[in-house]
Amino acid sequence: MRTSYSALATYQQCPQKFKFQIIDKIKAPKSPEALFGSSVHGALKFMFSRDPLFPTLDEVLVNFSENWKSAATKASKALASELAQIYDESGRKMLKTFFKSNPPWNFSVVDTESRFEVLLPDAETQEAHILAGIIDRIDKIGDGEYEIIDYKTNRKLPSQEAADQNLQMSLYHMALTRRWPSISPDKIKLSLYFLKHDEKISSKRTADDLSATRNSVLKTIRQISQSQAQNNFPTVVSALCDWCPYKPICPAWKHLYTKTELPVPDEAALQDALKEYFAIKETDNKNAARVKELQEIIKTYMDAQRIDRVFDDRGYFVSKKLQQRFKYDFDKVREILFANGLADKWEAILDADEAKLKIILKELPSPIRQQISDQRVLSKEFIVLTSSLKPAKLP
Ligand code: SF4
């Protein structure tokens, strides 16, 4: 099995979420928090890139704002501009503080966003697995000593005990010792950097911890294999469900999202509906024709009497109102816009217009018409009901 820390963590949080995401590969839009996290990570990678000089703080901030702007517009629902602005300010604040306490020239950075793959043979099942991942940053901090840094943009600070047992950092520790076997396992510092608080929580792992990490990973992989074999991925309902993009299709929640479906009518119900439908349509048509005749009578009376409103015995009234429609002289509009340096507004007016295109198409020679028609793409599909009051010949 090829897996990653995030896949294992998802399975441990909720096997059903793992199934949606990893097995069924159901694409889900990234949350604003995840998009924000990626933008900050991108800026931090840029901050430690030396080409040939490290970027300035201003360049880092511009890099972040550009990353975030493009991420926010890609979000499933484009983020409200106020919210996008709040995230932008928060990211810039974090980066300013981080830059001040961590000027990049003070560190000996070995790699950023460092990809790894660890081969994990399982003696119990005789299978081999690959664990892949990306380490945010690796620094050399002394002779034969290294520091693995993982940036966090969330608010919650874990306890030292939780950091000591953090599986993600244990996996990174294992990955580094596999990549560079000459490094002593206890010479690797593991740091979680909480950017919101400008706080770093560090821990270490021993050689014994390495085998505990391997056993823990293999145990989860075996559980996943068992779930797959039995097609059993139970839901684990928790407070985290509120951030789960699969909530509307999750067996634990989907009833809340299911609309009551209309029952499919039988033949007799259909015949009744058709009879009533045509009766109403016929009445509607008759009424529309009669309304026109009545309007004509009323209008003739009002014109002859030179009055604008007429009342019935109950006080209901009909008014006569002059309605006007205006047309623009577009030559003049163009002249005014160009004279005032607003040529771009004229371009906006000239934007492609499908209604006009349809009229022009009729006048074009057939091969050109065909060429243009071939460029159509389906943009919207919907069902309409049409009806005829003239009965068809029944079999
Ligand atoms: S909504 Fe909750 S229970 Fe359902 S898949 Fe997501 S995390 Fe699991």
Image (cartoon, helix red, strand yellow):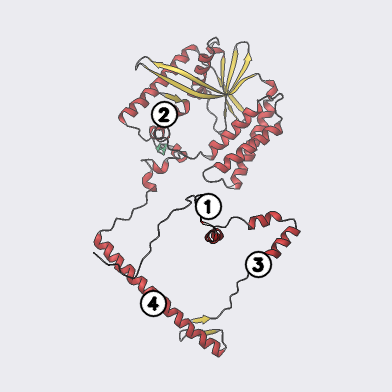
Q: CA distance from mark 2 to mark 3?
A: 66 Å
Would you say the beta carbon of the disc 1 residue lies within 8 angstroms of ligand 1?
no
Choose the circle earlier in sequence order: 1 or 2.
Answer: 2
Quadrant (top left, top right, bottom left, bottom right) of the N terminus: top left
Q: CA distance from mark 4 to mark 1?
A: 43 Å
Q: CA distance from mark 1 to mark 3?
A: 30 Å
Q: CA distance from mark 1 to mark 2?
A: 54 Å
Would you say the beta carbon of the disc 3 residue lies within 8 angstroms of ligand 1?
no
Q: Tell me: 73 left or right of 286.
A: right
The spot of residue 185 in percent (x, y) is: 53, 12
Disc 1 crowd, CA 10 A, few/some/many (<14, 14-19, 20+): few
The spot of residue 315 in percent (x, y) is: 48, 83
The numbered disc on residue 12 is 2
Q: Nearer the viewer, residue 273 or 357?
A: 357
Q: Tell me: 172 left or right of 283.
A: right
Choose the circle earlier in sequence order: 4 or 1.
Answer: 4
Q: Identify the residue under disc 1.
A: 372
For the point 25% across and 60% down, which residue is it? 267
The numbered disc on residue 286 is 4
Specify the amino acid type for callout 3.
Answer: Tyr
Q: CA distance from mark 4 to mark 2?
A: 68 Å
Would you say the beta carbon of the disc 2 residue lies within 8 angstroms of ligand 1?
no
Answer yes or no: is residue 269 visible. Answer: yes
Q: Nearer the viewer, mark 4 or mark 1?
A: 1
Q: Identify the residue under disc 3.
A: 328
Specify the amino acid type for callout 4.
Answer: Lys
